[in-house]
């Protein structure tokens, strides 16, 4: 049978039969894939490590009668620290849940952004929710819903006084341009999002946001996500 090699990230898993594992891969080449690891739940299984959540690697796939089977796997990064710290684990799970909900076709930008976010959480000691917030901001950018924190996206006036997120269009607007679907955004939330947006993932650990700005930003971005996609994502 023909084989295909993909570079992919394990974004979902569940047990099947006695020792099999059903796995959702987010691949660079083909987008979201549903595959089966045969016999990998045994103690001496050859690909035992490759089936785990967050694993990034190269996978060789073969089409079986009823499912796509992983025949070989080369682990590039297991993001092991995510398994040893509950806060890191849950934040990384939020990133994967977002990917599962929005991705089906190949999306190289989202693929790279996901790896950057996981690295920041696992290895760079980014404070809680910093990487997740940046991940969401980058996601909206790639979709064409980039947030302008200085200029009203409707009338193009400089943003002063009260500011609002227009959920219909996913844009920041001034008080004169707000609509019924607009929600007020606190200044500390704007400041937090602006700083996170402009800071590379590998420098997030150097930031110090005050006033709980990262929590308020996540709440706002989660509402924006739900409005755009009609679905909530996991947040712990």
Image (cartoon, rainbow, N blue to C red):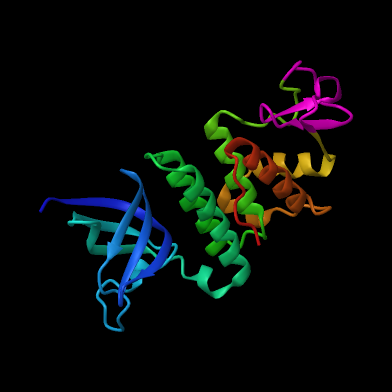
Q: Give x and y (percent) for residue 163.
A: 82, 31
Q: Give x and y (percent) for residue 190.
A: 77, 39
Residue 151 can be seen, yes or no: yes
Q: Residue at x 52, y 34 (%)?
A: 142
Residue 51, by quadrant, is bottom left
Q: Residue at x 70, y 32 (%)?
A: 167
Give the side of residue 37 with respect to residue 108, left or right: left
Q: Give x and y (percent) for residue 47.
A: 28, 71
Give the side of residue 5 with respect to residue 183, left or right: left
Residue 20, by quadrant, is bottom left
Q: Residue at x 35, y 72 (%)?
A: 49
Q: Identify the image quadrant of the C terminus.
A: bottom right
> Is 138 covered by the magenta stretch?
no
Give the side of residue 135 with respect to residue 236, left or right: left
Give the side of residue 6 with respect to residue 148, left or right: left
> Can you name the residue that lies furthest to the top here?
155
Q: Is residue 71 above or below residue 41?
A: above
Q: Give x and y (percent) for residue 223.
A: 69, 43
> Is 163 covered by the magenta stretch?
yes
Q: Residue at x 63, y 44 (%)?
A: 199
Residue 28 can be seen, yes or no: no
Q: Is residue 145 above or below residue 34?
A: above
Give the magenta-colored segment's residue range.
Answer: 154-182
């Amino acid at each position: 049978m023909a084989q295909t090699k993909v570079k992919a990230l394990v974004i979902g898993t569940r047990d099947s039969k006695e020792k099999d594992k059903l796995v959702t891969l987010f691949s660079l080449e083909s987008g979201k894939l549903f595959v089966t690891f045969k016999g990998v739940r045994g103690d001496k299984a050859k690909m035992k490590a490759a089936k785990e959540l967050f694993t990034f690697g190269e996978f060789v796939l073969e089409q079986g009668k009823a499912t796509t089977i992983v025949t070989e796997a080369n682990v590039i990064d297991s993001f092991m620290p995510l398994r040893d710290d509950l806060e890191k684990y849950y934040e990384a799970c939020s990133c994967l849940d977002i990917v599962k909900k929005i991705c089906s076709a190949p999306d190289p930008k989202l693929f790279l952004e996901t790896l950057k976010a996981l690295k920041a959480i696992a290895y760079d000691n980014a404070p809680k929710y910093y990487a997740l917030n940046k991940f969401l901001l980058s996601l909206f950018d790639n979709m064409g819903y980039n947030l302008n924190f200085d200029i009203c996206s409707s009338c193009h006036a400089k943003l002063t006084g009260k500011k609002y997120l227009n959920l219909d269009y996913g844009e920041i607007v001034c008080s004169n341009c707000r609509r019924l679907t607009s929600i007020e955004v606190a200044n500390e939330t704007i400041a937090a999002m602006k700083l996170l947006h402009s800071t590379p993932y590998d420098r997030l650990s150097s930031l110090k946001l005050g006033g709980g700005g990262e929590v308020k930003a996540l709440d706002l971005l989660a509402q924006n996500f739900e409005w755009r996609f009609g679905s909530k994502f996991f947040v712990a």
